[in-house]
Image (cartoon, rainbow, N blue to C red):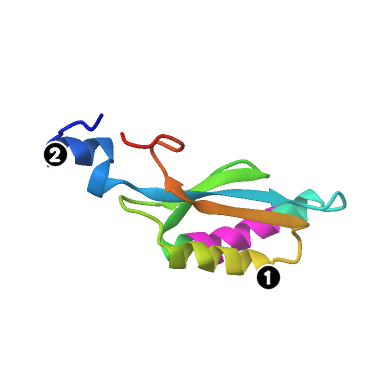
Amino acid sequence: MSKRRSARLRKKLCVGEFKELGFDLDLSFPETADEASVDAFYEAFFNEAIDPAGLIYGGGDDSGFVCCAGRGSVTPEQRAAVEQWLSGAKVLADYRVGDLVDAWYPGINGI
């Protein structure tokens, strides 16, 4: 059942036209990767792919979530740019870039 909410409340709840999108990210490093190479990967990842695009990454070494650093949604172009950057990363054994999903209510429709 659809709820009628004011624009102010929809904005506070990040629903409707104020919904914010992000995506999951799964990273796999080879067994032979040492801590220094993983740290160097993340340093480059943040400096070259995440920060310049106005994005933020939250999570651990093997999985996390990427969303906008401020209010707003990740665009398909930003998601594609991160995926392209990851495709050139030599230290990764594998990676998976998820689809754009609701950053505040993943898996729930109709909030």
Identify which residue is drawn at 26% across, 35% down: 13
Characterize the local packing of mark 2: few (<14), some (14-19) or many (20 or more) Cα atoms within 10 angstroms: few
- Measured as percent of width and height from the top left, residue 83 is found at 58, 64
> What residue sits right under mark 1 in the picture?
88
Image position of 61 with respect to 41: above or below: above
The residue at the point 49 percent across, 61 percent down is 79
Answer left or right for 23 relative to 10.
Answer: right
Q: Is residue 44 magenta?
A: yes
Residue 84 position, x and y percent, is 59, 69
**Residue under the point 45% across and 38% down:** 106
C-beta proximity under 8 Å, tags 1 and 2: no
Q: Nearer the viewer, residue 18 or 82?
A: 18
Where is the N terminus found, in terms of image quarters? Answer: top left
Report the disc number at residue 111: none
Q: Is residue 86 above or below residue 62?
A: below
The part of the image, by quadrant, that contains residue 11 is: top left
Say what secondary structure mark 1 lies in. loop
Residue bounds of the magenta highlight? 39-50
